[in-house]
Amino acid sequence: MREQAFEPIRIPAEIWEREETRELLKRRDVPALLKLASKYAGASQARIGAATGIAQSRISRYMRGLLQVTDLDVYERIATGLGMPNHARVLFGLGVNNADTSDLTDDLELRQQHDELIARLDAAFSIDSTMVAILSVDTNNLRLMDRKLGAAAIADKMRAQINQVQRALHHAVRPGIRAKLAHILAETASLAGWQAIDRCALAEAWQHYEMAKAAAHQADDPALVAYVSGEQAYVLADLGRPAEATELLQHVRATHRTRIPALTRTWLSAAEAELAAILGDEHTCRTALDRAAALLGEAGPDPDMPYIALDRHHLARWRGNCLVRFGDPETVEDLRSALAGMDGTFNRAEAATRCDLAHALLAAGEPEAAQPHIHRAQQLAAMTGSRRQRRRIDEVARLVKRALN
């Protein structure tokens, strides 16, 4: 096909981005620039002459280095004729083309995005096993602080940790490091989900659990997937949909039963018992509690699952929380045993246990004995900022007060 002499010269955008081209522009190397038009746009000397308004004979002499450009107007003609973008015009020592200022803006934005991506990839590539271990310890420390101080006290730290791990994961390339970062993000987002439940921010909690599930799948950890999915069921329960929450838990347990350790299965069974108690299904509740007790004997603590704090004292607390709904006379002893063996850092858990114990004592006709427990539960709930617990504690406190009057 014959060249159209008056067709605009279009040098590909990526050619203007090359470092060698940028250097040519800075040096105002006219011969080299004209050769770019010939090489990448297929432009003949005649076509370059037509595009720039410069005689072909002069174009030939410029390209052979026999004639130097000294006139600013000639530089402008060359820039316009070659379709030079604004960022290239600036490097060439010319002002921007006011008719196309958006090109410079767009180019600067693209370059900024390009540089930012490279910086983030470099930062993620610098993360090694030692850094992963540090991030994991940071999440575990947040978990310990949450138990003692509550969500409000560490809200800023939680957001910073999630953002840092999420950014690193999104730009991590090495598969081994990526999987470990996904595991940390799943744990951290799951903790944030539980904190949101505790604040009664259920829509926020759901979003955190969706993030946690996606990360757990990336980490390819069935135990973590099962745990996060199980915790998400509590959002449904607190929305007044315990039947759907139970269905979800049963599905999770059936799906992952052969792929998860005994400790995770223990936790799922105890959670299923709690939801059965909410539904008033005592038989299913007791069956699930017995299953959890049997599994716990096989399990024991697992350092690979710091997100599950479950021993015989915690299970006794869970049992008491469930059976107090059915007026079981053994509930008081279960809850007292749980309190006696509880780690002093579990302030939020202690608040819930004391509330359950006050409820059990009240049901046993001992409101005077219930009063100090409900008072301590109120103090602990205020300390940890637990709106979810304060609601139930206030309800039991009203019942205790009525029984004493």
Image (tube, rainbow, N blue to C red):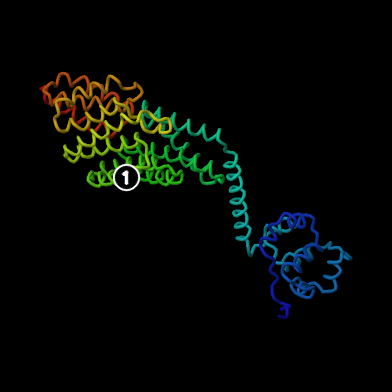
In this view of the protein, which residue sits in the foreground, 128 or 390?
128
| 166 lies left or right of 18 | left
> Height in image: 217 above or below 381?
below
Residue identified by numbered label 1: 252
Quadrant containing the N terminus in the rendered view = bottom right
For mark 1, give the secondary structure.
helix
Extreme-right residue of the structure: 66
User: Percent x, y for residue 383?
Assistant: 33, 25
Instruction: Tell me where residue 371 sits by quadrant.
Output: top left
In this view of the protein, which residue sits in the foreground, 353 or 222?
222
Quadrant containing the C terminus in the rendered view = top left
Labels in figure, total: 1
Instruction: Tell me where residue 72 sits by quadrant.
Output: bottom right
| 306 lies left or right of 333 | right
User: Percent x, y for residue 302?
Assistant: 40, 30
Extreme-bottom residue of the structure: 2
In this view of the protein, which residue sits in the foreground, 111 or 227?
227
| 183 lies left or right of 320 | right
Residue type highlighted by circle 1: Val
Tell me which residue sits at (72%, 67%) in the image.
40
User: Percent x, y for residue 152?
Assistant: 37, 32
Label 1 crowd (10 A; few <14 / some 14-19 / many >=20): some
Tell me which residue sits at (80%, 59%) in the image.
29
User: Percent x, y for residue 44?
Assistant: 77, 73
Instruction: Tell me where residue 175 sits by quadrant.
Output: top right
> Height in image: 31 above or below 56?
above
